[in-house]
Amino acid sequence: MSESVGRKIATVTGWNIIEQPRISNGKSKLQKNFSKYCQIAKREAVLLIVDMDRPSKACPCPVALIEEWTGGNAIPPGMFFRIAVREVEAWLLADHEAMRNLLGGQPKLSSDPDNMEDPKRELLNLLKRVKKYVRDDVVRVSGSNLFQGVGYNAVLEKWVNDTWSPERAAQRSESLKRAFYRLHG
Amino acid sequence: MIVTRLLLRNWRNFIEVDIPLHERTYLLGANASGKSNLLDVFRFLRDVSKSQGGGIQKAMHDRGGIQKVRCLHARNDPEVRIEIHLSESLDTPSDWRYILAFRNEARGEHRISVSSEEVFHNDDRLLLRPDKEDTEDPARLTQTAMEQIQANLRFRSLAKHFEGITYLHLIPQLLKFGDRIGGQLLEGDPFGQGFLERVAREPKHIRDSRLKKLGESLSWVVPHFHELRFIKDRATGHPHLEARYVHHRPGAGWQREDQFSDGTLRLLALLWILYEGDSLLLLEEPELSLNNSIVQQIPLLFQRVNRDRKKRPRQILTSTHSEALLSNEGIDPRGVLLLEPEKEGTSIRTINEREAALLRDGFSVSEVLLPAIALETAKHLSAI
Ligand SMILES: Nc1ncnc2c1ncn2[C@@H]1O[C@H](COP(=O)(O)OP(=O)(O)OP(=O)(O)O)[C@@H](O)[C@H]1O
Ligand SMILES: [Mg+2]
């Protein structure tokens, strides 16, 4: 998901996207390769979007997360290292117009998604109410629990690409706003 | 109808198996762990129940006799036993139960002899064999009741369901070059060679609406793919599929299936068969010759076809080695079965509590379950 969001932001802000090395998903994979991305960032621009996730003792805030990844070393100028608070789903929820387009009707949407406990859960709960045709692709209900469905990524990635606007979403998410205007230059 | 549970004793490399099945079930295991052997149980039930050319003698003969099928690890127990539970849907309690056990005749021609056969419907026993007549005439035990029209009247719907079971291990080359290699069709067409004939057999309106749907799904994954049509060659009468692509020059015309890419053909046949029947579908490694980004969407493909099929979702049992397929985080972990080779035979299990917790944490089936299988394989490789 972060990958499509990153693509969309980079496209809107006028960057050229080169597909090598393979753009990857997964926080631990990214962290493992962090020093390699820093090498690339000496020559080209690199956009890295990482979910903040639940704050922990070791990592209470975005600054601490950056500290943990860089080990205190300076970040090369070509590196755009952005933290989504709490996670990239909050950025999706921040574009109300696109959300309404996705969900239909008049869903109750938060005006401050950066401060949500669990944005992904929130998004799944909202998706539970979409018309059945889409619902069975994007959510899976198991007993009283709600999980992402087999088409969650496919459907949302298409929606991010076609409908979601980082500019609109930046109006409600501080962390996205900063990412967006950094890239906008 | 949906198969909800399967119990086995002494079937190929399984001494004892008791597993649940879901609407969509994935079989995971190292090479030679027994995935195809497990699928073969259902093919066997189909072969027994076929109204033409079926029956237990032939089904066993085609498999090289009971000595090939009975588990080599089984010590004194000469019997192979299959028990299968079915229900109208996943949410209703299982209403059908079929039990079939057999062994070799001790004397004479050493034919296969049914040692017990039982059918239950909603806990009513509809069949219990051997019965009095069987005891009087043991030759009767060379046939199952399931294979006899006169005997299966009260559970005909069960026999029909078994008969409708489809197995597919599609090999595109056999389809493309069928004419040239003298295309002999195996029974049940496991390799999909007869795919075009199946398309031809469908009434025109069903064929057209299905091809339209397939075209939509294909354009979703095959670059520049535009349109699909069915034709019969004027000269030979052979059925063909033709496709048109967006960027071909205007007069470029249509391409025939022998020009399709392997992946396009596999996907086409796979989609067609998903729409085709009603009974259980057995799929071998649907990931072959497809790009990972498509493979990742195979679970979504299954889901979308079943959505189109509305009230009659098709049950699918899939063997797979694919990391990409299993990286789809939407897969229902209850539908995942692990085959674990042991010193004697293979055991099958569902995911355990620890694994379930990892999946709830947001890891995918491929991240949680494939490492152990890779380790198993590595152990064998290091012995080479
Ligand atoms: N009657 C039997 N008793 C014990 N083992 C058997 C019996 N019949 C077959 N096998 C074993 O089963 C194994 C083959 O299993 P199978 O073909 O189902 O594997 P698979 O999981 O489909 O592997 P692959 O991923 O390579 O397709 C072989 O090692 C074979 O020795
Ligand atoms: Mg196999």
Image: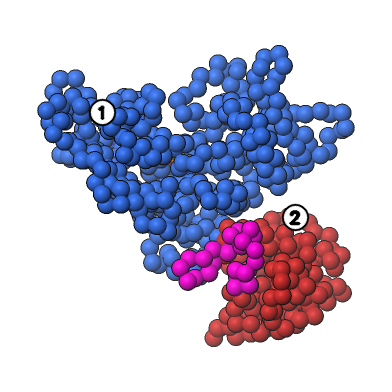
Chain colours: A red, B blue
Magenta highlight range: A124-147
Please give the count of numbered marks on the rendered protein: 2
**Res. A38 visible in picture:** no
**Res. A151 visible in picture:** yes
Residue beneath disc 2: A19
Residue visible at 69% across and 79% down in the picture: A109
Chain under callout 2: A
Q: Nearer the viewer, residue B162 or B269?
A: B162
Q: Nearer the viewer, residue A95 or A179?
A: A95
Q: Residues within 10 Å of mark 2 (few under 14, many from 20)?
A: few
Q: What is the residue that sits farthest to the left in this orientation?
A: B136
Q: Is residue A143 magenta?
A: yes
- Element at badge 2? loop
Ligand 1 shows up in which quadrant of the image?
Answer: top left
Q: Give the Cα distance between marks 2 and 1.
A: 62 Å
Residue A90 position within the rendered picture, expressed as x and y whole percent measured from the top left: 68, 76
The residue type indicated by label 1 comes to Gln
The answer to whether A83 appears left or right of B359 in the picture is: right
Q: Give the position of the C terminus of chain A as an image quadrant.
A: bottom right
Q: Nearer the viewer, residue B27 or A24?
A: B27
Instruction: Determine if the C-beta at disc 1 is less than 8 A from ligand 1.
Output: no
The answer to whether B179 appears left or right of A108 in the picture is: left
- With respect to residue B235, does B312 lie above or below? below
Residue visible at 15% across and 30% down in the picture: B133
Q: Nearer the viewer, residue A25 or B317?
A: B317
Residue beneath disc 1: B143
